[in-house]
Image (cartoon, helix red, strand yellow):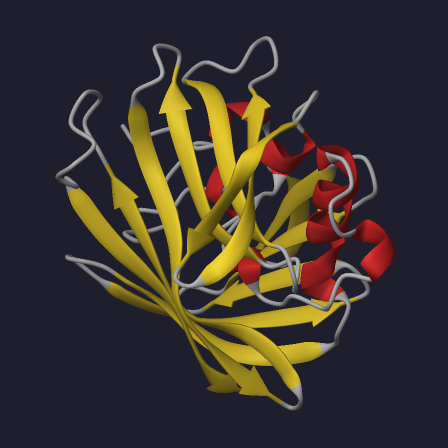
Amino acid sequence: MSFRLPTIISLLLLLEGTLFPLSLRGQDAESILQAARMNPTTHTATLRARIRGENASIPMTIRLKNHVVRYELENPSQTIFLTLLPAETKLSEEVNGKTKPISPIHCHDIIRQTGITYQDLSLGFLYWPHPVIQGEETVKTRPSWKIDLQAPAGEPIYGLARVWIDKESGAILRIEGYDKKGLLLRRFEVISGQEIDGFWTLKQMRIESFLPGNGHEATSRNYLEILGKE
């Protein structure tokens, strides 16, 4: 059974940060999150990527276009679609030529042996209600907003998601998921970025899992890596 996560990769979805206009800087949490939600797919791109962990290295192709992110895997062929909408995200999957929505019961399934779930690929946690700015912190020398989002009713594992967003670029730098007792379960952190065709994108992100109550020693580490253009 995998940890049930509020996002990730929100995955890949640290893919890009375009500069915030001055009018958005310092505004309320909802305005900041609204910009961060739509940032990843403002450019069209096809990227080579992989998920690298302790037990496997899984190559994939990521295609960005019109606010849709396509994750394409091979052997066997599988395509996962993430559609970013103003008020929600939608996940669907194409297997053997047929496309169907990812049902809630399967959202927490692990994708092959990557250690990453379908839910990880969504940005659902960024739509949780009543976000609150908890202050400003520096993440890897970058001044950032720290924003807390309370889990909605019905979320089985998480009680809170905490997000750090770069104040200048609007890029997500770190995500942490906490259980109902406030204990750390999962951390997503951007390790490095790179420039491809004039826009900045993720190069490497680390994904760590923790046993509740032991937030100092990760039980597993996986890495999402963007290798370059297709």
Which residue: 39% across, 61% down? 140
Residue 222 is situated, as x and y percent measured from the top left of the image, at: 27, 55
Image-based side of 132 in relation to 24, left or right: left
Asked if residue 131 can be seen in this view, the reply is yes
Image-based side of 129 in relation to 75, left or right: right
Residue 1 is situated, as x and y percent measured from the top left of the image, at: 27, 28
Q: In which quarter of the image is the C terminus?
A: bottom right
Q: Is residue 165 above or below residue 4?
A: below
Outermost residue to the right: 23
Q: Using the rendered view, name the quadrant where residue 129 is placed.
A: top right
Number of marks: 0
Q: Is residue 33 above or below residue 107?
A: below
Residue 94 is situated, as x and y percent measured from the top left of the image, at: 61, 54
Which residue: 61% across, 42% down? 123
Camera-side residue: 192 or 104? 192
Q: In this view, does 47 lie above or below 215?
A: below
Outermost residue to the bottom: 197
Residue 148 is situated, as x and y percent measured from the top left of the image, at: 55, 28
Camera-side residue: 92 or 228? 228
Image-based side of 190 in relation to 153, left or right: left
Asked if residue 230 can be seen in this view, the reply is no
Which residue: 75% across, 54% down? 38
Which residue: 14% across, 39% down? 219
Q: Using the rendered view, name the quadrant where residue 55 is placed.
A: bottom left
